[in-house]
Amino acid sequence: MSEVFAGRYELVDVLGRGGMGDVWRVWDLREHVFRAAKLQRQSDGAALLRFVRESSTRVDHPHVLTPSSWWADDGRVLFVMPIVAGGSVAVLLADHGALGDWWTATLGGQLLAGLAAVHEAGLVHRDVKPSNLLLEPTGVGAPVLRLSDFGIAARLDEPRLTSAAEVVHTPGYSAPEVRRGADPDPRQDLYAAGVVLIELRTGRRPGESGAPVPDGPLAGVIGRLVAADPDDRFASAAEALAALRAVPIPPPPPSAEPVEGFE
């Protein structure tokens, strides 16, 4: 039998690995369902405080995935959330490459809607990237995205857990001011969302300094999202979402190759 954590959650297999912990598929012995659970890998004080912050994060929104409970056992911490079985946007990109304007606008709109709720809750996510955007298993139907992994999220009204010289970010998705040690700001998440839209549209991963804005109907919105100066970006995720929704994007034609939203 596999390890059972806190007498309730049987660790089945690893779904993903991150800087702050591994995400496991676990079997809930009490409720007899599979769930996702993040198990802390690091034990220093700052890592533990980040874990506790993430476990206490609650954002009730259809495009946000936050923990439902947390447990401690033998010096380790595990928090549990619903399992999202459709893979991630990173998997979708690996399988299909560039996804076109409709998929870019649809997934981008759901991401911005989720970020609007996150920012309204006083949080900056700080790690928006395709592997943290999970998908419900909708088959060839319209996608349903959920923003996950709040392990390095920052509350705007609480002290930072890193110094200006110790910047936590994923290269390619972090705004220029983040790399200079700027304090967390919601507009940094907007920059990362813009880079994700570029990757959705082009199928190419960004370099350390981001990626050029592709031509097309979404160029104006994407260009403002990834502006080098945060004052030139949208003032909020809600404003960016309204601008994105104002761009007329027809659905893919029936003859287009279907994009499958499951592993």
Image (cartoon, grey):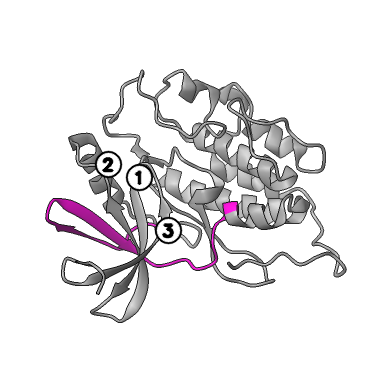
Dot 1 corresponds to which residue?
Answer: 151
Q: Quadrant of residue 231?
A: top right
Dot 2 corresponds to which residue?
Answer: 50
Dot placed on the residue nearer the N-terminal end, 3 or 2: 2
Q: Is residue 42 left or right of residue 6?
A: right
Gap in Å between the C-alphas at discs 3 and 2?
17 Å
Gap in Å between the C-alphas at discs 3 and 1?
12 Å
Residue 56 seen = no
Dot 3 corresponds to which residue?
Answer: 65
Identify which residue, 256 or 76, lies in the foreground: 76
Q: Is residue 108 left or right of residue 251?
A: left
Q: Position of residue 194 (x, y in %)?
A: 63, 38
Residue numbers of the magenta segment = 65-90
Q: Residue at x 65, y 52 (%)?
A: 93
The amino acid type of the residue labelled 2 equals: Arg
Q: Position of residue 57 (x, y in %)?
A: 32, 51
Whether residues under marks 3 and 1 lie with C-beta atoms below 8 angstroms apart, the answer is no
Residue 211 seen = yes
Could you classify mark 3 by the number of other residues whose Cα lies within 10 Å: few (under 14), some (14-19), or many (20 or more)?
many
The amino acid type of the residue labelled 1 equals: Gly
The amino acid type of the residue labelled 3 equals: Leu
